[in-house]
Amino acid sequence: MAYNLLKGKRGIITGALDEHSIAWQVAEKAHEEGATFVLTNAPIAMRMGEIKKLAEETNSQIIPADATSVEDLTTLFIQSQEILGGKIDFVLHSIGMSVNIRKAIPYTESNYEYFMKGIDVSALSFHKILAVAKKLDAINEWGSVVALSYAAAQRTYPFYTDMADIKAMLESIARSFGYHYGLAKKVRINTVSQSPTKTRAGTGIKGFGDFYDYVDAIAPLGNASAEDCANYCITLFSDLTRMVTMQNLFHDGGYSTTGVSLDVMHKLGIQY
Ligand SMILES: NC(=O)c1ccc[n+]([C@@H]2O[C@H](COP(=O)([O-])OP(=O)(O)OC[C@H]3O[C@@H](n4cnc5c(N)ncnc54)[C@H](O)[C@@H]3O)[C@@H](O)[C@H]2O)c1
């Protein structure tokens, strides 16, 4: 059911790789809610061709951009405004990649070149997107920018390795940039801390399936799906959340504030 929450709004959506991607779901929902937007992803992701299906489905154009490149991001914002016919109202940062995770390197033995790459792709890219947008004055007043995070920014998940530190940085950028952009142009910046979700990035983490089930058993509402996450992002892009900024917002079925789960205790054979 659509509510026209984004009617007349223009956006940029990063990170839609395939139909499992959280960004893919956000694009579908944004389209349903009346937004027009540009889709973007790393040039290498274009080769897989999946994103073209989404572009057709949502009447969107695609602009390839490596989110670590200020030059690419500048072109992205200039061209998006030309295509969409005005300044941007919302941006989704849905970009994450850790070479240390991909190569199953334990946290204590992190490769620093890979670590720096992870920081650049997954956290500094957020700063770069915001800095480019601010410099070009490309986002309308009361515009909204959302990046996706994970609870490992606050608490330790050993297998999340360097991405835990990188997500902590991402969330800090939302606060730091949120202050300056809010003061200058009333642009809102938040991160959404999403449940484990079965996407390309998610399932790349060793033991993800068991971990997914474990977290699902803790959260009273269960894990939030990519579609649920998309719905939440839409509310943050809408005018209904105008005064929300510089926040890390948990979207996890209650997982982050659950101490003990009866379900997990039962699974351990403990009756209470
Ligand atoms: N899946 C989960 O369990 C989960 C949970 C919480 C948060 N998140 C976060 O959600 C976001 C989206 O991930 P997802 O789970 O939808 O997986 P995904 O693999 O579908 O999306 C990750 C995207 O990042 C893009 N990307 C990688 N390097 C890039 C670059 N240099 N420039 C531009 N784009 C680049 C990829 O092409 C891909 O589209 C990530 O920030 C991830 O950390 C995921």
Image (cartoon, rainbow, N blue to C red):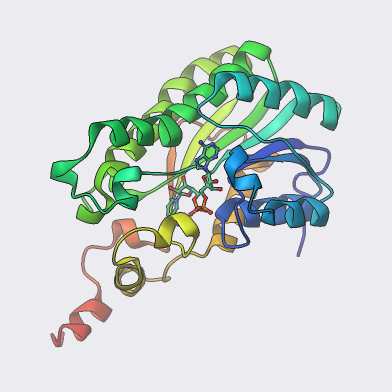
x and y percent of residue 227 in the render? Answer: 59, 62
x and y percent of residue 191 in the render? Answer: 47, 40
Q: Quadrant of residue 157?
A: bottom left
Query: Would you say 57 lies left or right of 92 here?
Result: right
Q: Quadrant of residue 171?
A: top left
Up/down of 58 relative to 265, above or below:
above
Up/down of 249 relative to 221, above or below:
above
Q: Residue at x 21, y 85 (%)?
A: 266
Q: Quadrant of residue 1?
A: bottom right
The answer to whether one can see residue 189 in this image is yes
x and y percent of residue 124 in the render? Answer: 43, 27
Q: Residue at x 27, y 42 (%)?
A: 162
> Which quarter of the image is occupied by the C terminus?
bottom left
Residue in front for this viewpoint, 20 or 174: 20
The answer to whether one can see residue 140 in this image is no
Q: Residue at x 28, y 51 (%)?
A: 160
Query: Would you say 171 lies left or right of 188 here?
Result: left
Residue in front for this viewpoint, 127 or 177: 127
Label total for image: 0
Residue in front for this viewpoint, 26 or 260: 26
Up/down of 173 relative to 206, above or below:
above
Query: Would you say 257 lies left or right of 47 here?
Result: left
x and y percent of residue 86 in the render? Answer: 82, 24
Q: Residue at x 43, y 67 (%)?
A: 223
